Amino acid sequence: MSVTSPDLVVAKQDSLLALSKDKRPEFVTILTTAHINIARRAESTGDISTAVDEYQKVLKIDPTNKTARYELLVIEGLNLYKKGSKSALWDAIELFSKAASINMDSGVANYWIAKSYEKKDSKDFELIIEAYEQALIKKLPDDLRQDAEDAKNIAYKNKATLDSFWK
């Protein structure tokens, strides 16, 4: 039900938590899964503030939930990335790095680290290439994987051009 009808489960949250003062693990799992599904649905429609609220609700129920922590760090990082200033990009890189350390299987945070390095300084080839390579050895959605491959190849080409210029 937490997957198919997350709104219904969340509506019964107070009742489920009231059944057990010590937060029975099965109720915690059901509720956190429901909130995560609502958050992901909100993200997919562009409703980022609802997604953030839902991930924060997960952390109130289960402060150790890695999925909610990871998603919040990525969302915060993306907000800073969009600002585009050098200090915001450094902060975004820090948040994406924290996210990458929480979910080491996903390459999404590494992808955004690379994008942030590109936006900050497009000539910082080593860091850009390293971040893309880290992203590509992990799980990535197909569209990000293709973009990472293309961007990595461009960075290699630009690095070679710059290196040959200085020889």
Image (spheres, grey):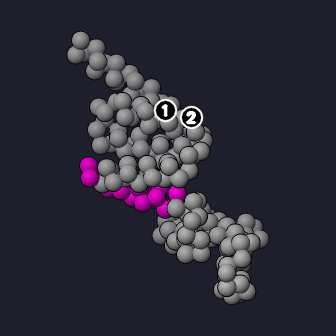
The residue under the point 28% across, 21% down is: 162
Extent of the magenta region: 70-87
User: Residue type at mark 2?
Assistant: Ile
Label 1: few (<14), some (14–19) or many (≥20) C-alpha neighbours in 10 Å: some
**Figure quadrant of residue 39:** bottom right
| Residue under pointer 1 | 133
Q: CA distance from mark 2 to mark 1?
A: 6 Å
Label pair 2/1, CB-CB below 8 angstroms: yes
- Decide if residue 5 is on the left or right side of residue 75: right
| Residue under pointer 2 | 137
In the rendering, at what x and y percent does residue 160 appear?
34, 18
**Figure quadrant of residue 158:** top left
Looking at the image, which is closer to me, 157 or 61?
61
User: Residue type at mark 1?
Assistant: Glu
**Figure quadrant of residue 66:** bottom right
- Tell whether position 73 is magenta: yes
The residue under the point 49% across, 65% down is: 48
Judged from this view, the residue extending furthest toward the left is 166
- Tell whether position 81 is magenta: yes
Vertical order, 104 against 57 (above or below) = above
Q: Secondary structure at mark 1?
A: helix
Q: Secondary structure at mark 2?
A: loop
In the rendering, at what x and y percent does residue 71 appear?
52, 59
Vertical order, 55 against 134 (above or below) = below
The residue under the point 41% across, 40% down is: 114
- Decide if residue 19 is on the left or right side of residue 35: right
In the rendering, at what x and y percent does residue 165 appear?
24, 15
Would residue 50 be visible to someone looking at this image? no
